[in-house]
Structure formats: C-alpha cells, structure tokens
Image (cartoon, rainbow, N blue to C red):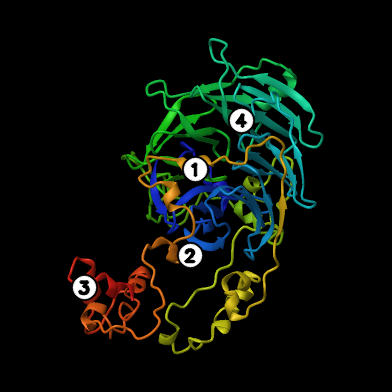
Amino acid sequence: MNLELLESFGQNYPEEADGTLDCISMALTCTFNRWGTLLAVGCNDGRIVIWDFLTRGIAKIISAHIHPVCSLCWSRDGHKLVSASTDNIVSQWDVLTGDCDQRFRFPSPILKLQCHPRDMDKVLVCPMKSAPVLLTLSDSKHVVLPVDDDSDLNVVAAFDRRGEYIYTGNAKGKILVLNTNTQELVASFRVTTGTSNTTAIKSIEFARKGSCFLINTADRIIRVYDGREILTCGRDGEPEPMQKLQDLVNRTPWKRCCFSGDGEYIVAGSARQHALYIWEKSIGNLVKILHGTRGELLLDVAWHPVRPIIASISSGVVSIWAQNQVENWSAFAPDFKELDENVEYEERESEFDIEDEDKSEPEQTGADAAEDEEVDVTTVDPIVAFCSSDEELEDYKALLYLPIAPEVEDPEENPFGPPPDASVQTTAPEDALAGGDKKQRQPSSEGGPAKKKARTTTIELQGVPSDEVHPLLGVKGDGKSKKKTAGRPKGSKGKDKDFPFRPKPYRGERPSFPVEALGSSGPGGGGGGGGMKGRAEGGLPTGKHATAPVAAESGSSASPAALLV
C-alpha cells in the first residue's frame, strides 16, 4: 500500500480496540521491527512468537529459552533478534532459520536490552543491580559503562536515535550522556521535583523521528526533553523539560511509555490497570484514554512505527488498538462530488447543446499534452516512511516478511498430497521457501542435520549479586502467578514432574483387577496400565468402558492402586 496515502487529516492515534493476538502461551513482552511488518512476542514458556502483522497470523515460532522471555529487540535490518530471559541469558537469533547464533550468561537478571540503531554488532544490556553493559557480538567482548555513584547501581540506559550517545539514569535522578564509542561523559543533569528533591529514573525512551526523548520517573511524571538542548548544556546542566505529563486526578504510576511512529504523540501504560493514556507532545494535552479489561495488569506497550496502531500486553494476551475505519463502498464518476446537503445547481448555457457553436479548437494542454511524455515505470522510489532523515535509499537487504508454506492437517485425507509417513517430503516445499527452516521444525530423532551449537560466553561483573530474582517472576494481581506458569508447557519433555503419582514398573505377576476399574480394552488411550498417563496427556478414553476412568476421578469405588498400575 502507498504509505503516502496513510497521512490522515484528522487525529493520528488509535481510538478503539481492534482485536487480540493469542500466542497460546502467556505473552510478556512485544516489539515491532523497524517497518512494522513483523511483531515479535516473548512468552512465559521461553518461546518467541513472530506475527505477520498485516495478515495477523503467526509467521514463525522460535523455541528460544527455557525460562520466560523478559526483553526483545530487532536488529536494524530485521534479520536478527536479540532476546533475554529471566535465567540471565541473552541470545541472538537468526530470524529466517530460527537458529541461535550465540549466547551470553550474566550473573544477574536482565531488565532491558536494546540493539544499536545503526551498528548491528553492538547491544546495550541493563542487568539488575549493575552498571549497564555494552556487548560486542562479533568478538564476544563487553564494556561496563561508567556510573555516577558506585553505591547506586539501579541504572537504566538507552541509545539515542542514531546510537551516537548512550543515556543512563540512576535511582537518584542523575542522567549521564556517554559517547558510545569512547564511553566518555559528554553531558549530565539531574531530574528534580518541585522541592529540589531527586526522583528515581524508571526508563528512558527516544522518538524514532526528531531529537526528543522522555524520562519516566518514580514521582509519576513523564518529562519530555530535547536531546540537542541536553548536549548544549554540557556537564551538570539544568535543562528544562519541554513537557511534563501526568495524571493529576488519579496520580497513576506508569509501567511503560513510548513515542508514536512520527514522534507527535506519547502513550503511557498504567501500572495499576489495563489503561493507555495518549498525549499530544507539542501541546501536552491528554487526547485519549484507552481502557482494557477491568482488573488486568499491563505488562508492555509498543506503538507501530508507521501506522496509528498500539499493541499492549495484559494477562498474557496481546491487544491491538487502532483507528475506527469507516468504509465507504460508493463508486462515483471521477468528477462526481458527494454532498452532505443539497446545493443549488447553476446550468451552463451550452451544457445540453448537441454541438457548441462557440467552441474554439482546443490546444494540447493538461492531460492531452501529458500523453506525449515518457512515463518511467522502472525506477522504484524509496518509501519516505521507511528511510531515516540522513538516508536517501532503503535497505534492500532488509527482512520485511517471513515466507510461510501452508501446512496440511490431515495428509491421509488429501488424495493429491504425499503419504502421511513421508515427513521429509512434506517439509521440502517449506524448506525451499523458508530458507532452511527444516533445521528448526524437524526433530533430531528423525535424523535431520544436527544444529550448530551456539557459543555461550559468561559475562563476569564485579560486585554484582548473583541471587537476584527478576521482577517478572514476582508480579501479582494478574490472576496467575508468573512463578506458577513459568517454564515449558505440559506438552514438553518434563511433563511428568507436574504429577505427584508416577507409575512404577511392576515386577512379577500382575494382580487381577476388574477390567471396569482399570478402564482397559478402550482403544482411546485412557485405559490399561496407563490410566493416569492417558489423562495427563489429555486423551479421552473411548470404547466399551470409556466411562471407567471418569468414574474413578469423580469419587467412585475404584481403588487408587488400580490407577497406579
């Protein structure tokens, strides 16, 4: 679609809910790629679900971690995805193949990570109770960034729009601006409240366009600054914020804040409920409040890079907020005007004449003259919305979409498809499209090619406690504790650990139990010696004695020993 047509004359922010994206497992964090075509969602079972945002379908699932995914970031060209999990692991993934390129193990939980906006070899990591770390992926080296106070290590950090500087903020309200290449201090200032008291910095976010950035602080005020003014003030400067945004009525604390794609609006998610507040940056007025389901807690918010669309996460589900599109299917002649009310029409004198006697020979102007011009149909103009202000051309190596092959659910019912046992042939067309996705989808038991084991680098940080627990694992009020739902789903290899009763191998002659109590002779998988296992795997017994296991569950006279055999 031509993105120039998306410039609306009215408001450019979402107004209502536009459906949800269900990732099967609970979603915890989400992020758009640079063009907004793909949405990566990190889940509590360690998987990364990549959605094709135009079709609203799942394009790929990467079994990334064992523990919940707490932070995600796309590389600039969209080919790589960097993720962090609550077990202190940072991994880099190849999006097309789903393979892990390398891993980094940190001593403490990762609160946030961010890829360099221009240099795809650098990643900024914010460990808990530690100074921020700048990783270099190619040689697995790291640099610990300097902090203002060694005793205060509750530090957040972020790259600026082009990655030239790194902004860090601590719990005492001190902002440091560091040169990315040399780590030298360029500018600094302190965020203070009206009584000159300091307030803790919770997050720093930059706009995709322009030089503005926002600071979310513990005093429940979002301050918007101009990055050029910060650099001009230098060290220990006293810049004034462009805007101070807050909820004066409810004194709402903010969980997550970000800019719109064009940098004209700011959205903030409430830390108390599923509510999104949208302000206009230039004026500072609140233009919209989007309310989600009552009683849910917000986990993450992401604004689409190009369109007025917001994705928010609460209760493990991704909610989409968009504008109300009024469809007008009327088709008119090109010179026909749609009128809201009647207009008196003035008839021309020669309008209904068969021949206009006073008409002179027309000159070749306008459309007739344009027919003689050559039209260039080979040159592809770059889409302005996809280019930065210092770029003239798009990145033609960028990964905007993921190829998908249709999957046949019941191969035996398809007379023209391959036989059901030909698993290798079934995945062949998909491999040709996905560029080697076979390695990710084909289990190793089928004799597929072995994956190249990713290199794991341990990052040593001095004086960092190693017994810290990630804040995500202690979140309450969502109806479901993250500790309870963390890890792989029950369909994985470790499912037997969830059940207190485990069948043991029996040596010698088996005792004779009634067939009805055991629920045997049913071909549906709930009977025989595996009644408990059959129910654990979700199978419903069928056949003559299908009701026997159900009766045993609901308190019948079947002995417990019968279920353990």
Query: Which residue is drawn at the image coordinates 39% and 39% (left, top)?
Result: 274
Q: Where is mark 4, residue-wise?
A: 154
Would residue 317 be visible to someone looking at this image?
Answer: no
Q: Relative to the observer, which residue lies in front, 399 or 184? A: 184
Element marked by disc 2 = helix
Q: Which mark is residue 558?
A: 3
Q: Quadrant of residue 515?
A: bottom left
Relative to 83, residue 287 above or below: above
Q: Which residue is mark 1?
A: 472
Q: Quadrant of the C terminus?
A: bottom left
The residue singled out by tag 2 in the image is: 494
Label whose residue precedes the other's in the sequence (2 or 3): 2
- Please give the count of numbered marks on the rendered protein: 4
Q: Secondary structure at mark 1?
A: helix
Identity, as a three-letter code, of the amino acid under mark 4:
Asn
Among the two numbered marks 4 and 1 on one chain, the one whose residue lies closer to the N terminus = 4
Q: Position of residue 345 (x, y in %)?
A: 36, 41
The amino acid on which the numbered mark 3 sits, given as a three-letter code, is Ala
Label 1 or label 2, whichever lies nearer to me, is 2
Viewer-proximal residue among 90 and 241: 90
Residue in the foreground of this view, choosing between 260 and 551: 551
Which of the marked residues, 4 or 3, is nearer the chain's N terminus? Answer: 4
